[in-house]
Structure formats: structure tokens, C-alpha cells
């Protein structure tokens, strides 16, 4: 199979993945919009020993994606990767403060399933920002 065909198949697969994530995001948003539900009461399954490690990998991938986006969109930027990431971490702290005000301070004691819905909802918003 030629390289061009492989690239086209991969691109189509990634676009389908983008659409699927957007659909999951909508489902997650509907689920999270039930204002009369106390999400702390939702059954919390056991998680593996690697649960936190996997979440850290998700967070690290998000920081890398933002760093890459900034570096690609500002080719003449004089900031180093470390300076850009420092600014990203500052913005993450600001977003966490905003979320604490909006939803309540940590710990919220939510089920990992609820956090998964939150992650999908946010990931869906990212998917919508990617031009088709």
C-alpha cells in the first residue's frame, strides 16, 4: 500500500475519531447537566493502581498539545519551551481556581466515571475547535 493511501486512511480514521469524541462529549454534557443529581452519590468503582498514572499522562499530553500549538502558531516566538509551559501551568492554575468557584473546592469526591464524563466533555470541546 502506497504511503499516500495510508495517510488518507489514517486521516479518515482520525476524522471519524473526532466525530465520535464530539458525540461522546454531547452524551457526557447531557449526563453532567442533571442539576438535581448529587454526583458524589454515584457508585464509585475501584480503580487500578495505574489510574492516577494514566491521568497524569492525559494531563501531560494536554500540556504537550498546547505547547506544540503555541510554538506552531507563533513561529517567531522568542519564548523557550520551558517558558511556554510555565505560562500554561499558570493558566491551568487559574482555570482550576475558576472551576473551584463554579463547582466547589476539591476534593469533590466524585466517581471516576463522573470524572471520565468530565474529561470526555472537555475533549469534545477540543474536537469541535479542530477545523474539518
Image (spheres, helix red, strand yellow):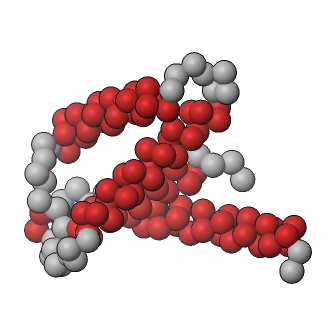
The answer to whether any part of residue 58 appears in the image is yes
Residue appearing at x 52%, y 46% in the figure: 65
Is 98 positioned to the left or the right of 15 in the image?
left
| Residue 24 sits above or below residue 99 on the image | below
**Residue at coordinates 34% horizontally, 34% vertically from top-left?**
89
Residue 94 vs residue 74: left or right? left
Does residue 30 appear in this view?
Answer: no
Does 127 sit left or right of 101 as displayed? Answer: right
| Residue situated in front as seen by the camera: 31 or 83 | 83
Going 43% across and 44% down the picture, which residue do you hit? 63
Q: Which residue is drawn at 56% across and 69% down?
A: 20
How many numbered badges does the structure rendering display?
0
Q: Establish if 128 lies above or below 22.
A: above
Viewer-closest of 21 and 76: 76
Above or below residue 75? Residue 104 is: below
Which of the two residues, 19 or 80, is positioned nearer the viewer here?
80
Residue 55 % position (x, y): 31, 60
Residue 36 in the image: x percent, y percent? 18, 59
Of residue 68 and residue 91, the one placed in the foreground of this image is: 68
Q: Is 65 located above or below residue 21 in the figure?
A: above
Viewport quadrant of the N terminus: bottom right
Q: Where is residue 81 in the image (x, y as percent from the top left)?
A: 49, 32
x and y percent of residue 33 in the render?
31, 57
Amino acid at each position: 500500500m502506497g504511503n499516500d493511501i495510508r495517510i488518507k486512511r489514517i486521516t479518515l480514521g482520525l476524522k471519524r475519531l473526532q466525530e465520535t469524541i464530539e458525540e461522546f462529549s454531547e452524551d457526557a454534557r447531557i449526563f453532567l447537566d442533571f442539576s438535581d443529581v448529587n454526583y458524589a452519590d454515584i457508585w464509585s468503582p475501584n480503580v487500578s493502581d495505574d489510574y492516577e498514572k494514566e491521568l497524569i499522562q492525559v494531563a501531560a499530553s494536554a500540556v504537550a498539545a498546547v505547547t506544540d500549538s503555541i510554538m506552531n502558531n507563533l513561529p517567531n516566538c522568542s519564548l523557550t519551551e520551558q517558558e511556554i509551559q510555565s505560562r500554561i501551568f499558570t493558566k491551568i492554575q487559574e482555570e482550576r481556581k475558576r472551576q473551584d468557584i463554579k463547582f466547589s473546592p476539591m476534593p469533590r469526591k466524585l466517581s471516576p466515571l463522573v470524572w471520565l464524563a468530565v474529561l470526555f466533555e472537555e475533549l469534545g470541546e477540543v474536537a469541535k475547535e479542530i477545523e474539518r
